[in-house]
Amino acid sequence: MSEAADSPRATEAPGRDAPHGDPRAAAILVAFVMFLSILEATVIATALPDMARDFGVAASELASASLPI
């Protein structure tokens, strides 16, 4: 048998020693997603009274439809 087949690395699952991504990139991605979520909620909350007036309903009736998914 070859030396590579006898080594413990040959029996480990592939990708086990794969390098992990940059933790700063993950933190930036999470912060960006949170920013977009807050921005979306702000835009909807700002536009909700005008939308309610256009539809002829109370703003409280539209509030449940503005929940982010």
Image: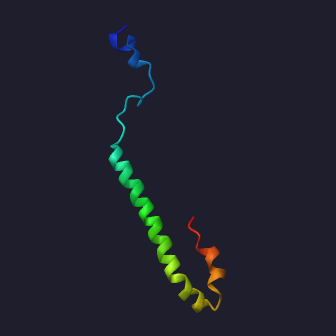
Residue drawn at point x = 42 percent, y = 29 percent:
16
In the rendered image, the quadrant that contains the C terminus is: bottom right
Residue drawn at point x = 63 percent, y = 80 percent:
62
Residue drawn at point x = 51 percent, y = 77 percent:
44
Q: Quadrant of residue 28?
A: bottom left
In screen coordinates, is 28 left or right of 53? left
Q: Please, is residue 53 above or below residue 23 in the view?
A: below
**Coloring applied to the structure:** rainbow
Q: Please, is residue 20 above or below residue 17 in the view?
A: below
In screen coordinates, is 51 left or right of 64? left
Q: Position of residue 50 (x, y in %)?
A: 54, 88
Q: Quadrant of residue 53?
A: bottom right
Q: Position of residue 66 (x, y in %)?
A: 58, 74
Total marks in image = 0
Q: Please, is residue 39 above or below residue 52 in the view?
A: above
Q: Position of residue 65 (x, y in %)?
A: 62, 75
Residue drawn at point x = 43 percent, y = 60 percent:
33
Q: Please, is residue 25 above or below residue 41 in the view?
A: above
In the rendered image, the quadrant that contains the N terminus is: top left
Q: Position of residue 67 (x, y in %)?
A: 59, 70
